[in-house]
Image (cartoon, rainbow, N blue to C red):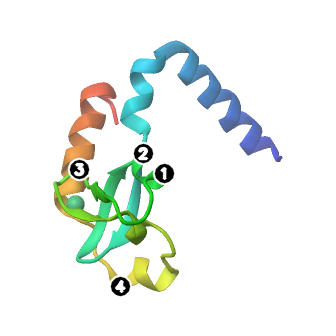
Amino acid sequence: MNKIDRKLARRSYRTKQSIGARMSEYLTYIWRPVTGGRHAFPIAAKKTPPGETVTAFCGAETDAAQLHDRSEVDWIREETCMRCWRILAARMSRHHPRM
Ligand SMILES: [Zn+2]
């Protein structure tokens, strides 16, 4: 662990301490390049077994299997879903006015 990593680890620890559990739900999402774009999904989607449907923040639905086994090529090929992006940005600015 280098100096910067330690600094970041300390900072994120403090952030969690001061803001508390309420904050964590707003940081628990993942971006995944699934059919039709790179969407943001709640982190729980990662644990959803293949065959079940997961829903992105914008409402797009996909098989949970789509969240796994994605290559770098998929990331380059798919465009970021702007609806997901805006929804997350709005959540962020509500909780971090300066970001
Ligand atoms: Zn989306």
The foreground one among 87 and 60 is 60
Give the distance between the C-alpha atoms of the residues marked 3 and 4, in whole angstroms.
20 Å
Numbered mark located on residue 1 in the image: none
Q: Secondary structure at mark 3?
A: loop
Residue 5, above or below 72? above
Q: Which residue is mark 4?
A: 77
Element under disc 1? helix
Task: Mark 3 or mark 1: name the one nearer the start of the chain.
Answer: 1
Rendered location of residue 82, percent (x, y): 19, 61
Residue at horizontal 73%, vertical 43%? Answer: 4
Spatial CA span between label 4 and label 2: 25 Å
Give how far across and how far down residue 20 sits, in percent.
48, 16
Along the line of sight, the residue nearer the viewer: 64 or 87? 64
Residue at the disc numbered 3: 57
Q: Secondary structure at mark 2?
A: helix
Type of amino acid under label 1: Lys
Query: Which image quadrant: the C terminus?
Result: top left
Residues at marks 3 and 4 touching, judged by CB atoms closer than 8 Å: no
Q: Mark 2 Cα within 10 Å, few/some/many (few <14, many 20+)?
A: few
Determine whether 86 is above or below 67 in the image. above
The amino acid pointed to by label 3 is Phe
Instruction: Say which residue appears at 57% left-offset and 16% top-offset.
Output: 17
Observer-side mark, 4 or 2, equals 2
Q: Amino acid at mark 2?
A: Ala
